[in-house]
Image (cartoon, coloured by chain):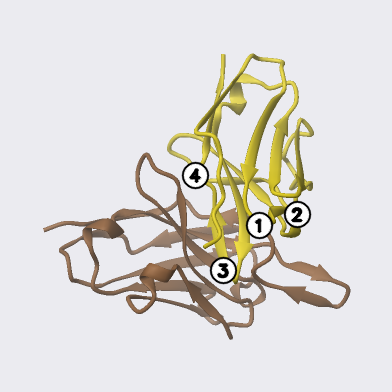
Chain colours: A brown, B yellow
């Protein structure tokens, strides 16, 4: 079970970037998937998440409207489209899988911990 | 908005017990998770659903959660446990992380 991010780089303010997260060993369509970022030397900040069935997408409040999360079950890949990038978006971006919490026959997203993490991809927004 | 608070640092001697608290409003009503992160590495889940350990995590790691405080306890702390530890819970379909605690083993 692995996650591998790519797509990071150096971009000028105001530009766009798309991050990819390729999963192996499991199907992204069966799990809630998330992006978490970390400014070097600082803590973890949840960025966005997409429910296992893809019907629900949530974003950190301040990022709503600029970032868009999606996943492709055929490519077994999750994406983060980032628009109008700002210097404060500079960070290492991790993708992570959420453990599926199930009670009886019903399973829930947005409840449990993140049990698989990628190695991270670095985004630097600078002119 | 929902926030989680952790002490910025905790120190412990090798072989002793380290306790890292995480506080948040009605945190006991939610599941708490804990992550370990060593320098230059990705976070690793060490506790989920308040008290459960993923496979491969040593038994010396344990968790509790009640009222407004979740606690990560490391019994018989080893030098390799020196790392940053983050608590995490969910609120209104968003994941919230604590600010992190640097555990120093000395």
Classify mark 4: residues with Cα within 10 Å, few (<14), some (14-19) or many (20+).
many
Q: Is residue B23 above or below residue B84?
A: below
Chain containing the residue with disc 1: A
Q: Which mark is residue A33?
A: 3
Q: Are marks 3 and 4 on the same chain?
A: no
Q: Which mark is residue A113?
A: 1
Q: Which mark is residue B49?
A: 2
| Left or right of A103 on screen, residue A26 | left
SS for dot 4: loop
Classify mark 2: residues with Cα within 10 Å, few (<14), some (14-19) or many (20+).
some
SS for dot 1: loop
Q: Position of residue B77 (x, y in %)?
A: 68, 22
Q: Are marks 1 and 2 on the same chain?
A: no
**Residue at image location 69% in from the left, 45% down from the top:** B69
SS for dot 3: strand
Task: Point out the tag, 3 or 1, that comes first from the N-terminus.
Answer: 3
Q: Position of residue A38 (x, y in %)?
A: 40, 50
């Amino acid at each position: 079970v692995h996650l591998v991010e790519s797509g990071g780089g150096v971009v000028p303010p105001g530009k766009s970037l798309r991050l990819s997260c390729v999963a192996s060993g499991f199907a992204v369509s069966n799990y809630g998937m998330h992006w978490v970022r970390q400014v070097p030397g600082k803590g973890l900040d949840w960025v966005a998440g997409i429910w296992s069935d893809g019907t629900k997408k949530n974003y950190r409040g301040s990022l709503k409207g600029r970032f868009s999360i999606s996943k492709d079950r055929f490519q077994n890949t999750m994406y983060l489209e980032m628009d109008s990038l700002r210097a404060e978006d500079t960070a290492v971006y991790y993708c992570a899988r959420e453990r599926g919490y199930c009670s009886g026959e019903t399973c829930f997203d947005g409840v449990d911990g993140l049990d698989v993490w990628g190695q991270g991809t670095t985004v630097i927004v600078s002119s | 908005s929902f926030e989680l608070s952790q002490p910025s640092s905790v120190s412990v001697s090798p072989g002793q017990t380290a306790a890292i608290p995480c506080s948040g409003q009605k945190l006991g009503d939610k599941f708490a998770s804990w992550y370990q992160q060593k320098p230059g590495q990705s976070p690793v889940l060490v506790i989920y659903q308040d008290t459960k350990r993923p496979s491969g995590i040593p038994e010396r790691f344990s968790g509790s959660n009640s009222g407004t405080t979740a606690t990560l306890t490391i019994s018989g702390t080893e030098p390799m446990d020196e790392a940053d530890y983050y608590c995490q819970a969910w609120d209104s379909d968003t994941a919230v992380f604590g600010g992190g605690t640097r555990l120093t083993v000395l």
